[in-house]
Structure formats: C-alpha cells, structure tokens
Amino acid sequence: MSISKNQLKLIQSLTQKKYRLKHQLFLAEGVKVVNELLQSSFEIFQLFATNDFSCEDFQDKRTLISEADLKKISQLKTPNEVVGLFKIPTQKPIKSSGVTVVLDAINDPGNLGTIIRLCDWFGVTQLICSEDTVDCYNPKVVQASMGSLPRIAIHYTTLITFLQQSNLPIFMADMDGENVYKTKLPEEAILIMGNEANGVSYEIKQLANQIISIPRFGEIQQTESLNVATATAILLSEFKRGN
C-alpha cells in the first residue's frame, strides 16, 4: 500500500510547530523511539511501517508502506522501518516537589532532547521551559530524547511568573557561580539552565537564590564553556549524589 497525497501532506506538515498545534499530533521515527512511545501512555494515531516492523498490538493503526515511501516521509538520513504519528497529550499540573529543571531559551533540538533524556535518567519528572525554548515535539527533539518523552512532564510557561510563585530554592548555572562541588545541594530545588549562547537572561538571574558553576580543571583553561546538556548532566548528578 502506498501513502496517499493527504497522508503525505499531513506528515510533512508536522515538521512545523503551527501544524503540530493545529492537528495536535507529532512525529516519531525509528524502531526504538516508536516502540517506547507505543508502550507509554501516549496515544498512537497512525503508524507507517515497512514489513520489517512488527507491532501485533497495533495492527489496526498500521499502514504498510514501501522503503521508497518511507524515505519520502522520513526526517532521518537513514530511514528506519517506521514513522509514527502520536497525539500530543494533555499537559499535567505543575508540581512543587523534588528537583525541577527550568530551561531559559534553549534553541537546539538536540540539546533539549538530551536534557529530556537526562531528566529521565536522574529521576527528574518535570521540566519547565520558557515559551521561546524549542518545541519538545519537534521531530529532532523527539529523536534525541530516545523514548524518554512520555516519562517527563514538560511545561511551557512564563518563567518569571513560575519562579516568583515557587517556594523552592532556586539555583542557576553560570560560569561565575560558586563551585558546585563545594555547595550543599537540597533534595528539593529548581535548577535553571540558560541559552546556549547567552546563558540565563538578566530578568531570570535576579530571581536566583544561588548561582553555581562547574569548575575547569584543565591546565590551559581556554575552553569557554560546556555544552548546556553536558552541564545539565553534571549538575543533576551532583544534586542526586548529595542526597
């Protein structure tokens, strides 16, 4: 069976945020990512798969397609057996417990996807994003998150309002902060990570209770900064290690 023109148009439109919002659907690709989503609470809308992809529980949602058609709809350099359309879930209420990661204007889809994965790894169940952070249902974010997306409650909101209303201590990552390895970190807190090029915005900085940094140990010390996802991994490890 081949893909219809309407199906092709829908799939291609979901690479753009405005159409994801309009249809309340997003794209996922590849066996691992699609299988993780199928086993989650996310609701499948349609699967487009070659004969190589096995999905006994979702036969009614599967459209068999050729390798040629898979290449037409894939966003990957090397298409991998299946493309899934999933329904965007209803947003859950924001919680005020544990460690919450806050992202201020993260632009790179790969960074956001990796941070979602890191939250899953370190048991952080909630991620708060500024409204100008890249969309978590961007296909590149979904791919980079490697199936962790359903396990993290992701909220897009006005950060200033959220931070002003929170009762948790607010930690911010910055090059000029206190050495994180010498800082006592609480079990419940907010950790703010900033934009790849500019860091945390001035207005958000004013709301931080404590600024922390990851010290450089290299002898030459010419590296300007760490990638935001790498820095998030180190800081979350320290929050969890201290408890």
Image: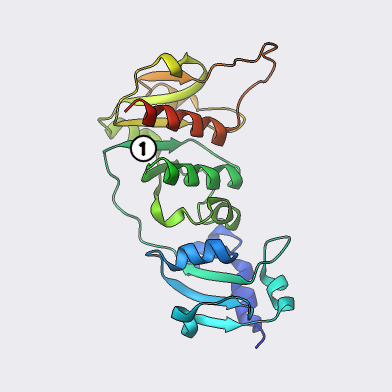
Where in the figure is residue 218, as x and y percent of width and height? 65, 15
Q: Height in image: 161 above or below 31?
A: above
Residue 19 visible in the snapshot: no
Q: Which residue is drawn at 61% across and 81% down?
A: 6
Where in the figure is residue 198, as x and y percent of width and height? 59, 28
The figure's colour scheme reads rainbow
Q: Residue at x 67, y 71 (%)?
A: 73
Q: Quadrant of the C terminus?
A: top left
Where in the figure is residue 233, as x and y percent of width and height? 50, 34
Q: In this view, does 217 lie to the left or right of 93?
A: right
Viewer-proximal residue among 125 and 209: 125
Q: Residue at x 70, y 77 (%)?
A: 69
Residue 65 visible in the snapshot: yes
Q: Height in image: 47 above or below 199?
A: below
The furthest residue to the bottom? 1
Q: What element carries label 1?
A: strand
Give, as a three-letter code, the residue at label 1: Thr
The furthest residue to the top? 219
Q: Residue at x 54, y 48 (%)?
A: 113
Q: Is residue 180 left or right of residue 52?
A: left
Q: Quadrant of the N terminus?
A: bottom right
User: Around disc 1, counting alpha carbons within 10 Å, would you say few (fewer than 14), some (14 to 19), or many (20 or more)?
Assistant: many
Q: Height in image: 162 above or below 16?
A: above
Q: Mark 1 points at which residue?
A: 100
Q: Height in image: 110 above or below 65?
A: above
Where in the figure is residue 46, as x and y percent of width and height? 51, 76
Count of residue discs: 1
